[in-house]
Image (spheres, grey):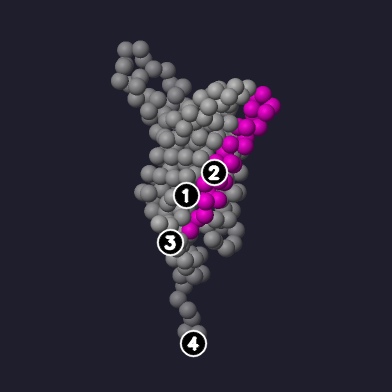
């Protein structure tokens, strides 16, 4: 059964808790999806497979966000496609030019992909005016900081005697990115749907 999309007047932001859960889960699930795409690229002997990073993360985060967004403000499947395609393009371009990505070099294509994602998604809020355009820079900041956080935690050297911490470190690194992404974009999402101050003022007497 198809979900009944909300009317324009009843559109609202995704509840903050659900947004955090969807975005964080999408980030975590994106890791194994990314590895599966990597394996598929190697199976067909593609010379480079860095596009799997953008495709895996963009598709899973975008899909789980879209599941919530279509219930709250009627976002179409274009939300998912903007996330999947937008995040894939910079990594695929690096594959085409033979530019290898490692460590902090992953942040730049992630930020560029986030810009494409934000530009593709900002029209799906159903909001008039320029406010929706802020979704693009917010996406750039959120995705870049999320990637930087995960990479920074992965770069922390582990102590050879701390077996439990050695296992927890990658789990914290992979999970932290989605939390950072959701905590930054969540308040922006709420702000986008906040009525302008003029609309909250009572009508003047005699009107």
Is any atom of residue 114 visible in this view? Answer: no
Tell me whether circle 3 and circle 1 mark residues in contact (CB < 8 Å). Answer: no
Tag 1 near tag 2, CB within 8 Å = yes
Q: Residue furthest top?
A: 160
Q: Which is in the foreground here, disc 4 or disc 3? A: 3
155 left or right, relative to 44? left
Residue 152 relative to residue 133: left or right:
left
Tag in front: 1 or 4? 1
The location of residue 34, given as percent across then percent down, is 49, 31
- Kindly identify the residue that appears in the image at 47 percent across and 66 percent down: 7
Query: Spatial distance from mark 1 to mark 2, Cα to Cα?
Result: 10 Å
What residue did someone put label 1 on? 66
Identify which residue, 37 or 12, lies in the foreground: 37
Assess whether residue 77 is covered by the magenta stretch.
yes
Judged left or right of residue 35, residue 161 is left
What label sits on residue 4 in the rendered view? 3
Residue identifier under label 4: 206
Task: Look at the picture and state if 111 lies above or below 201.
Answer: above
| Mark linked to residue 8 | none
Q: Is residue 65 visible?
A: yes
Location of residue 62 in the rendering, given as x and y in whole percent from the top left corner: 49, 44
Start and end of the magenta stretch? Answer: 74-102
Q: The residue tagged with tag 1: helix, strand or loop?
A: helix
Give the spatial CA distance, label 3 vs label 1. 14 Å
**Label 2 packing within 10 angstroms: few (<14), some (14-19), many (20+):** many
Residue 83, labelled with which disc?
2
Residue projecting furthest to the right: 97
Residue at the image point whose x is 48% and y is 58% from the top: 74
């Amino acid at each position: 059964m198809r979900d009944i999309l909300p009317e324009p007047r009843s559109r609202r932001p995704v509840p903050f808790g659900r947004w955090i859960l969807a975005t964080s889960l999408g980030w975590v699930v994106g890791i194994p999806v990314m590895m599966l795409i990597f394996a598929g690229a190697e199976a067909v002997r593609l010379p480079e497979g860095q596009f799997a990073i953008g495709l895996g993360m963009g598709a899973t985060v975008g899909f789980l966000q879209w599941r919530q967004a279509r219930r709250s403000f009627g976002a179409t499947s274009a939300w998912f496609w903007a996330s999947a395609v937008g995040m894939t393009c910079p990594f695929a371009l690096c594959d085409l030019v033979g530019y290898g990505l490692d460590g902090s070099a992953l942040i730049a294509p992630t930020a560029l992909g986030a810009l494409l994602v934000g530009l593709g998604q900002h029209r799906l809020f159903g909001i008039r005016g320029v406010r929706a355009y802020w979704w693009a820079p917010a996406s750039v900041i959120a995705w870049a900081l999320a990637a930087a956080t995960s990479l920074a935690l992965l770069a922390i050297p582990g102590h050879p005697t701390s077996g439990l911490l050695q296992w927890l470190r990658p789990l914290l690194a992979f999970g932290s990115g989605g939390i950072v992404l959701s905590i930054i974009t969540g308040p922006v999402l709420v702000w986008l749907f906040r009525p302008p101050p003029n609309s909250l003022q009572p009508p003047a007497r005699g009107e």
